[in-house]
Amino acid sequence: MSMNMQGRPTGIGTVGTAASGSALLPDEPLLFEIGDTGHSGVDLPEIELPHDRLGGFQRRTALDLAGLTEPEAMRHYVRLSRLNHSIDSGMYPLGSCTMKHNPRLNEKMARLPGFADIHPLQPVSTVQGALELMNQLARWLMTLTNTAAVALSPKAGAHGELLGMMAIKAAQAARGEGHRNTVLVPESAHGTNPATAAFLGYAVRPVPAREDGTVDVEAVKAALSPDVAAIMLTNPNTCGLFEPQVIEIARAVHEADAFFYCDGANFNAIMGVVRPGDLGIDAMHINLHKTFSTPHGGGGPGAGPVVLSAALAPFAPVPFIREGAGGLELVEHEEGEALGRITAFHGQMGMYVRALTYMLSHGRDGLAQAAEDAVLNANYVKARLEHLFSVPFPAFPAMHEALFDDSFLEGSGVTTLDFAKALIDEGFHPMTMYFPLVVRGAMLVEPTESESKQTLDRFCEVMAELAEDAKAGNTGRFTAAPVKAPRRRLDETRAARQPVLKWEKPPELPRAAE
Ligand SMILES: *Cc1c(COP(=O)(O)O)cnc(C)c1O
């Protein structure tokens, strides 16, 4: 946020607001502009401290927090929340992110006091139910993937990648193969894959994508060498395609004594249908917040458990749960070859409850149906739009995502970015743009299984109408968009490079009388 002379937020790089404060969409000021710092929003009696019990460290200056009443503070945040699109207010086809509906049953279960009000340092005998839930979740994850172990504690997909690659590093060090310093990453990979490898000190060797959007086993074989520790492959991949040679790739990687790390962020397309362990994976993170429906986006908590093959199971981190004579035990200290902790405690309890609730309410057949419906919905969108849009990889059916490139916009003066912004004016969250990088001007649409045919039809009609309008040369509608959102086009690059993170009291405003 930047400030204008009146101290009102203008938003960095904004073209201006669409409607400067209409009744239901007020132009929301900052907390400090609603409440002044000179008084408190709650009444507390004046107190005289008889003697200093803080060893001289008590605060001497004002705290300078905005003095707000509870309703003022609540209304501020509720009004802010209405400025954002959300999965609860409209379709959110953001590819790779699996923005599916979060059933309210999950929320109800996660709020049960026996799960919500426990403390990680409580005696283990008092949290047997919570441990049993974690144990059941672990069994579901291992069964759905046909793997030997699972580490529950990583707090996001990227965190899980880090853990999985640390386990691979430890396994190779234990075999005296610490010289393996290179990781193969296909060009279509999510950015977190090469970032994880580089973070652990590996050199990243790209594997080129084939014309048809998949990875060629021959290209993998050509890239394999004695210094390769692992391949990090996403399946289904970020082009929304199931890798047809995944088994051959796993075999080639194992023949070179390297490991197969699978990015499992797209597990929603295959859960209950394909077990990644059967394909030869050694480690794979599962984004519980994506596949098993917990609210995410906007920085909410996530959970990225990592399933491990028998070869990597001994290198799982602590803590883990073990069945003992007196009930479930929590192994908190390193034993044998186990890695240390990857996070302070056991992970995200609320996410575990939501994920297991989702699994139990669907059952194994229901999970498979959800995956099949996600694939069906994506193919429906693709089939309805492919005559107007351009499909970069027509050779294969889509999995859970429909991917378009920008060649249908050629000569129109409209870019992928403009097109996505125009979608905001129509009440939809934009699709993922310019990712995967191997596709020019990519538009990655992931409708998920949650959307009804009616909603998909409405979305397809809007997409088709926009495509026809762009081709007809009605550029202004796109380059000016969004015009119906609380903020217009933001300079996102400037916002990222020059963030203004601190509110400065505008000098023009005199301080409230003390
Ligand atoms: C979301 C995603 C990740 C990262 O997961 P986070 O939970 O956001 O850290 C990695 N790979 C792919 C393909 C993803 O879609």
Image (tube, helix red, strand yellow):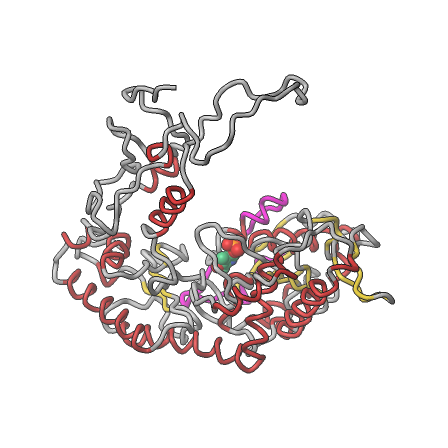
- Rendering quarter of residue 373: bottom left
Q: Where residue 67 sits: x, y (%)?
A: 41, 33
Q: In the image, is residue 388 above or below residue 478?
A: below
Q: Nearer the viewer, residue 405 or 494?
A: 494
Residue 458 lies in quadrant = bottom left
Q: Which residues are magenta?
A: 195-224
Q: Is residue 209 magenta?
A: yes
Residue 473 can be seen in this image: yes
Q: Is residue 25 above or below residue 234?
A: above
Residue at far front of view: 45
* Magenta run includes residue 74: no
Q: Nearer the viewer, residue 184 or 435?
A: 435
Q: Is residue 352 left or right of residue 170?
A: left
Quarter holding the N terminus? Answer: top left
Residue in the foreground of this view, choosing between 209 and 292? 292
Q: Hey, which residue is sitting farthest right in the picture?
A: 325
The image shows residue 488 at horizontal and vertical percentages of 24, 46
In-image side of 383 versus 333 (left or right): left
Q: Is residue 187 above or below residue 75?
A: below
Q: Is residue 215 left or right of residue 176?
A: left
- Which residue is at 73% across, 60% downward? 127
* Number of marks: 0
**Residue 189 seen in this snapshot:** no
Percent x, y of residue 441: 31, 56
Residue 348 on image: x %, y %: 61, 56
Please give the name of the residue rendered at 30% of the width and 38% of the height, measured from the top-left corner.
11
The quadrant of the image that shows the C terminus is: top left
Q: Does 61 appear above or below 306?
A: above
